[in-house]
Amino acid sequence: MIYILQWFFENNYNKISLKDLLSYYEKHWPEIKYFDNKTQKEKPMSNFFFEEGIMMLKNFYQKNGHKDVTIISLEAPFEISLTDQNDQIHIVSGIIDRIQKTDTRYEVMDYKTGKRLPTQTKVDQNNQLSIYALAFLDKWPDIKIKDLDLSLYFLKFGEILKTKRTRDELEETKNKILKIIKDIQKEKSFCPKPTVLCGWCGYKNICPVFKHYQPKPEIEKDEMNIKNLMDKYFTLHQKRQNLEKEIEQIKTKVDNYLVNKNLYKIESNEGCFELNDREDCVFEWKKVKDILKPLGKWTQLIKIDQTEFNKIMREIPENIRNEINNCKIIKNKTKVVTATHKSENNIFKNGDINKNIQSRIYDDFTDI
């Protein structure tokens, strides 16, 4: 979008019609691409963005098509030098979308295509505009800061939000930048944080995230094998997710059937589903403490740990276990359906008790 507007102002914009502007935009649309992080490839923008661009250009032309302004520069690159306390010089560079003059005032403008319109407070605190002001005054030091407007042009809304800066505020910006530079230099591990904006980044060629996308004379065999394994992993992972989703949908249907028909068990050729009652309960731990403390068992529960508690319940005499069970507070009762495959129905397997059955027998015993 910025390049379309650059062409508009560079080519005698007062004589360009809206039809010509939209025609140029449509002609160059296929060239507009973005970087898709999922596929790690460049893709053309969707029709939604194309139509949104048409709307933005219509609004822009209506407000600017015949406006009498003097364009000083478009897509103007800049560099400003900042010196820290150790006399080390740091260069801050960037590009300003548009600088123009109206009567006796100057305006530095940056185009925005975002979905949100910020508050005036946010605009007044915008660091980007503060840096642009530093760059402008560095290039034209004789222009007074009171004659400089800083603007964000939100193309989606057709709104221009303006702000100003004082000399003191610009000094604050310099100090803030130097502090950020210092913090960066102190950081031993500077991990990249990939986002959807990576596609527009000019530093992909040196970024670790994109290291494996750089052209190489020859791809090592080991690396190719690893990439094949990675592809297989993601394919299997997706299949597993799809299967788990399908299994859950089937289980829900069978669960509902059992509950609606008031059945407690139903068998098929491959296995069975059972409907059981399950109590969701908690213990009155103060009472439990009074019971366990004389036995020297309470200290084992440094924190309320259900696993440790179950272990203690198996170790204490039956009469005390029953006393503790009387401390239960049933919060909720739910129906629980367990699915058992035929291969799991054989209690004895290779001379050992099936662990699933063994666990259930043990738990049932401790509940007596």
Image (cartoon, rainbow, N blue to C red):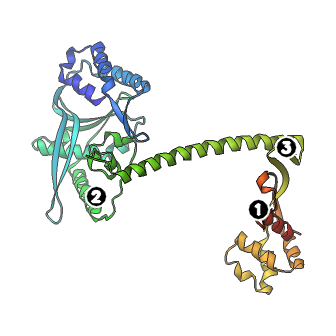
User: Are circles 2 and 3 on residues that touch, CB within 8 Å?
Assistant: no
Residue type at mark 3 is Leu
Mark 2 sits on what residue? 180
Q: Residues within 10 Å of mark 2 (few under 14, many from 20)?
A: few
Q: Position of residue 103 (x, y in %)?
A: 16, 28
Judged from this view, the residue extending furthest toward the front is: 350
Kindly indicate the quadrant of the structure image that contains residue 304.
Answer: bottom right
Q: Position of residue 118 (x, y in %)?
A: 40, 39
The residue lying at 23 percent from left, 58 percent from top is: 178
The residue lying at 80 percent from left, 44 percent from top is: 255
The residue lying at 33 percent from left, 23 percent from top is: 29
Kindly indicate the quadrant of the structure image that contains residue 50.
Answer: top left
Residue 306's tag is none
Mark 1 sits on what residue? 356
Q: Is residue 10 above or below residue 79?
A: above
Q: Secondary structure at mark 3?
A: helix
Mark 3 sits on what residue? 258
Kindly indicate the quadrant of the structure image that contains residue 74.
Answer: top left
Q: Secondary structure at mark 2?
A: helix
Q: Nearer the viewer, mark 1 or mark 2?
A: 1
Q: CA distance from mark 3 to mark 1?
A: 23 Å
Q: CA distance from mark 2 to mark 3?
A: 63 Å
Q: Nearer the viewer, mark 2 or mark 3?
A: 3
